[in-house]
Image: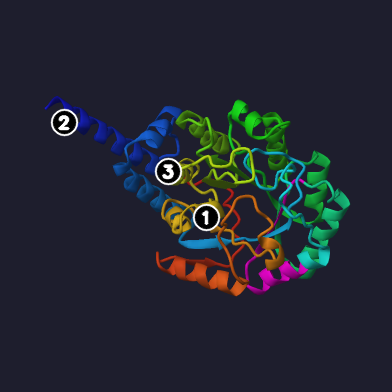
Amino acid sequence: MGNEMSLSKFSAHIEYLIAKAKTENALSRKEIVELLKMPGNFSFDLFAAADVVRKEQVGDEIFMRGIIEFSNHCERNCLYCGLRRSNRKLSRYRMTEDEIIAAARQIKNLHIPTVVLQSGEDSFYSTEIICSLLERIKNETGLIITLSIGERSSADYLSFQQAGARRYLLKQETTSVDIYKYLRPGCKFEDRLRCLQTLKKLGFETGMGTMVGLPGQTPEILADDLLLMKELDADMLGIGPFIAHPDTPLAGLENDALELTLRAIALARLITRNTNIPATTALGTFHSRGRIQALLAGANVVMPDFTPEIYKNLYDIYPGRADVGSAAEIMAGLQKDFASIGRSISYSAGYRKVKLDS
């Protein structure tokens, strides 16, 4: 009888927390940890609450951003990433400016309004080269431009903005200084944080992100990740499972954090309300229905990869990535998936609303 009463009280407490999260955006760190750690039978209710808030705040349409991975050179040596500079097995490439423009035109022809230019941290691409590229894309396609090229100086960020970039993605991966230092040798979390603060100050729509299932990560650390993204008022939150590449020091490190990743996405929606949250490619790689599950747990953005086929497999951050096939095949597959859950593609810019609706 006592155990049944305790279980009843626990269930009522979890239901209270989910109801609170659905109507407020003020969960404490302790409450977030509780929801991350709760038994699996409560996940559906959490996901459903996040889905209701998603619908209220950002609607049913799914915003699209087309990715071009224009260089797989990287000067960093992250322990999990296939692009790390010590990976001698990887054939390296850099797309020419004309190749990038052609890929951007393909995205434009699909009526996707935003292009994401992504690469490893590659200093070959000077400020001048990047700005020239940005100006050409802006003038020749009119696409909204997102950059994801890592840590640069404040002056570089300003130059990129003046040349036409409007969004910038810079994932912090974790708020644990020790885990960050371990995973990214020679890098400092403080530098990452300073870059994010600079981007926000300059007026970029700024994307952050974290990985779920990192070695040494606890629910408390993951809660801190979510709260940091709220504190910095990030405009986009990329949350995906940790996947180690087989040609890295962390090869073979298993991760079964699909449900925990979905919980983190749901909680991100509940505590930030109107932030744009992608159903990441990593989730689509991790599980065949991973992106769809994320869209049912609060996500509202999908970022298909339109890197030319001759390069796509060489951007090998982790194996078996989603979005294989031609641009038309990718779009047809996504439209079918979205229709299966009663959602459709938005061809609007998908800027985040300025004011938070609570």
Provide residue 44's location: percent of width, then percent of height: 33, 48
Secondary structure, mark 2, is helix
Mark sitting on residue 285:
1
Badge 1: few (under 14), some or many (20 or more) residues near its Cα, within 10 Å? some
Q: Is 156 left, or right, of 51 in this rendering?
A: right
Is 189 colored magenta in this rendering? Answer: no
Amino acid type at circle 1 is Thr
Q: Which residue is mark 3?
A: 263
Q: Nearer the viewer, mark 1 or mark 2?
A: 1
Of the residues shown, which amino acid type is indicated by label 3?
Arg
45 and 257: which is toward the camera: 257
Quadrant showing the N terminus: top left
Q: Residue at x 66, y 29 (%)?
A: 181
Q: Residue at x 75, y 46 (%)?
A: 74
Considering the numbered disc 1 on the image, is that residue within a helix, a strand or a loop?
Answer: helix
Q: Is residue 279 visible?
A: no
- Sequence-wise, the earlier of marks 1 and 2 is 2
Q: Is residue 31 above or below residue 233?
A: above
The answer to the question of whether label 1 and label 2 lie on touching residues, with beta carbons closer than 8 A, is: no
Q: CA distance from mark 1 to mark 2?
A: 40 Å
How far apart, in angstroms, are the residues tagged by discs 2 and 3? 26 Å
Q: In this rendering, does residue 292 appear at all?
A: yes
* Number of other residues with Cα within 10 Å of mark 3, as a class: few under 14, some 14 to 19, many 20 or more: many
Q: Which is more toward the observer, 278 or 203?
A: 278
Residue at the disc numbered 2: 4
Residue bounds of the magenta highlight: 101-121
